[in-house]
Amino acid sequence: MPRFKSRETNYLFFQIDLNNQFNYKSIEYMLSDFVDKHIDMNKFENKYNNDIKGQPAIHPSILLKVILYSFMNGVNSTREMEKLTQESLAYKYLSCDTEIDHTTIAKFMSKYRLEIENFNIQKEFINFILRKNISEKIA
């Protein structure tokens, strides 16, 4: 009788430290660093009104990171963004391992469209990356 390797589909679960997966030269790290250090989140935070009742909200910086990263990668569908926060390590890193519903993303994009446009975030982020790369080459 022939012998075969096992066909069992037992899954291995292992722990991944997302902070170690994305070093300071990765675009995901730079985007996260940029949003955390160079975007005034008060413009977003001040519009939340869940101090007394309601569930804790997903922090606007997390939503902003997911949206910007999606646009950088040609992802425009909020349903696809939702799926990526569940499956992609890069999205898990940017979302702090939070699975974000597509309606939450869509509402955020709709509610804060003007704030996002007025920041010129894309232009500022490109300049941030260029300055970072130039300073690394000099050092």
Image (cartoon, grey):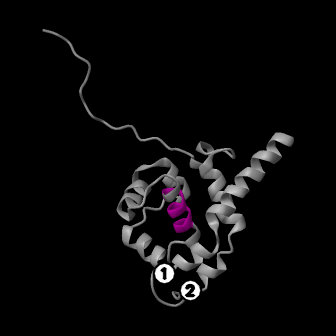
- For badge 1, the amino acid type reads Lys
Residue 130 appears at what percent x and percent y? 73, 51
**Whether residue 105 is situated above or below residue 30 in the rendered picture:** below
Q: Measure the C-alpha gap from mark 2 to mark 1.
A: 10 Å
Q: Main secondary structure of the magenta part?
A: helix
Specify the quadrant of the image occupied by residue 37: bottom right
Residue 59 appears at what percent x and percent y? 55, 72
Specify the quadrant of the image occupied by residue 118: bottom right
Which residue is painted at 64% across and 72% down in the image?
119
**Would you say 81 lies left or right of 112 here?**
left
Which residue is painted at 61% across and 45% down in the image?
22
| Of pointers 2 and 1, the one earlier in the residue sequence | 2
* Residue situated furthest right in the rendering: 139
Which class describes the residues within 10 Å of circle 1: few (<14), some (14-19), or many (20+)? few
Residue 36 visible in this rendered orientation of the protein: yes
- For badge 2, the amino acid type reads Lys
Mark 2 or 1, closer to the camera:
1
Instruction: Give the magenta part as a residue range.
Output: 62-70
The image's mark for residue 47 is: 2
Badge 1 element: helix
Q: In which quadrant will I find the C terminus? A: top right
**Would you say 138 lies left or right of 54 here?**
right
Badge 2 element: loop
Specify the quadrant of the image occupied by residue 1: top left
